[in-house]
Amino acid sequence: MTMNKRKAEEAAVHSASWQEGWLQVKVPVPFSLKWVNSYLIPEQQGYTLIDPGLRTDEAINVWDAVLLRHGLHWKDITRIVLTHQHPDHYGLAGYVQERSGAPVFMTRGAHAYAISLWGEGSVFSQQLQSLYAEHGMPAALRAAIAENLETFVNMVSPQPEVTYFEAGSHMMLGGLSWLLIDAPGHANGQLCFYQKERQWMICGDQVLPDISPNVSFVPGEEGNPLKAFLNSLHELGQYGVKLAFPGHRDPFTDFQGRIAELRQHHEQRLDKMAAMLAEEPRSAYDVCEALFGSRLNGNAHQWRFAMSETLAHLVYLERNARITSVSVDGVYQYSAVTP
């Protein structure tokens, strides 16, 4: 098989055309999610690229194949827009910027988080290990998570020069005006983009078909992330949406129905955790292991997601006075509040 034929076949697998000339590019990621969606939107001059993906050799090969298949070059990308800062969306932004010269847009809050993780002198890994230690996670697993975090540095390098935009403003995409909507919980600083006339929503990872977006409690962003997420879902449910473009899986139509399912999922998870803690006090790690341990198979990346999501739910329950916590020998133990 020739190089060009192989690239053409790879591009066909990893791209799909949508209305108005939009191109969905399925950029591979080395996680269970398999791919992240990038969207190329035709403009009067060039293309806007939304969420270029994680920087890996496989991802770059897919991009090279897709551009070749559609007769495009990196210089045809005139703007790079990031829904949020997670590495599977942000990682290639600097690489594409170097090759295209395009500006990169993201929110100030999202950029601050990216710098806290991968900027010079970052202490995020140490802070995360301290957080997990006081919630009962064994040292060996904490060390594996720290090692896994370090692998992401190359996958987000080079980091881009950023232009800020903010929720509440409007941006022209594909010749249409889109409202930028704050969408916290999964990622502080995340934006959704809404086009009123078409009733289209670019929703990042806030509302996904078939997948429950991770909601994490992380160092430096203490608060009540699950409450923020649920409040955001309530707000997004007020918009009429005929077609939603998510960060993972394929575009879908039942936006409000999916929001209802996500809200129900978290209500059931909260009830289950409260019932567990009514049986006996547990650390956050004990709760996490009981809920997710059998599915994680020692995967440090997945353990980080599971542990931080467990903490987000425990914070929500404690703030709502359904559980309480006390430090025992340096580890927080949670128990249900007796009615």
Image: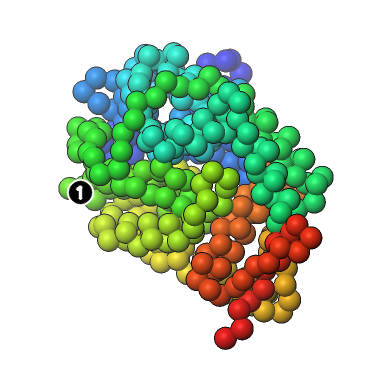
Residue 24 falls in image quadrant: top left
Above or below for 147 versus 99: below
Q: Residue at x 67, y 79 (%)?
A: 278
In the displayed structure image, the side of residue 6 where residue 45 appears, left or right:
left
Looking at the image, residue 275 lies above or below residue 209: below
Front residue of 301/210: it is 301
Furthest residue in direction right, as rendered = 140
- Relative to residue 303, is residue 97 drawn left or right? left
Residue underneath mark 1? 196
Viewport quadrant of the C terminus = bottom right
Q: In the rendered view of the protein, which quadrant contains the N terminus?
A: top right
Going 75% across and 53% down the picture, which residue do you hit? 137
Q: In percent of the image, x 62 and y 49: which residue is there?
A: 305
Above-or-below relation of 250 to 261: above
> Horizontal and vertical percent for residue 121?
61, 26
Asked if residue 200 is positioned above or below residue 270 in the image, the reply reads above
Q: Residue at x 65, y 67 (%)?
A: 325
Residue nearest the viewer, comparing 104 with 282: 282
Q: Amino acid at mark 1?
A: Lys
175 relative to 287 in the view: left or right: left
- Residue 288 percent location from the top left of the image: 69, 60
Neighbour tally class for label 1: few under 14, some 14-19, many 20 plus, Cα within 10 Å: some
Please provide percent x and percent y for residue 312.
56, 58
Q: Is residue 168 visible?
A: yes
Q: Is residue 155 visible?
A: no
Figure disc tally: 1
Seen from the viewer's position, the closer of residues 215 and 89 is 215
Query: Helix, strand or loop at disc 1?
Result: loop
Position of 152 with respect to 109 (left or right) is right
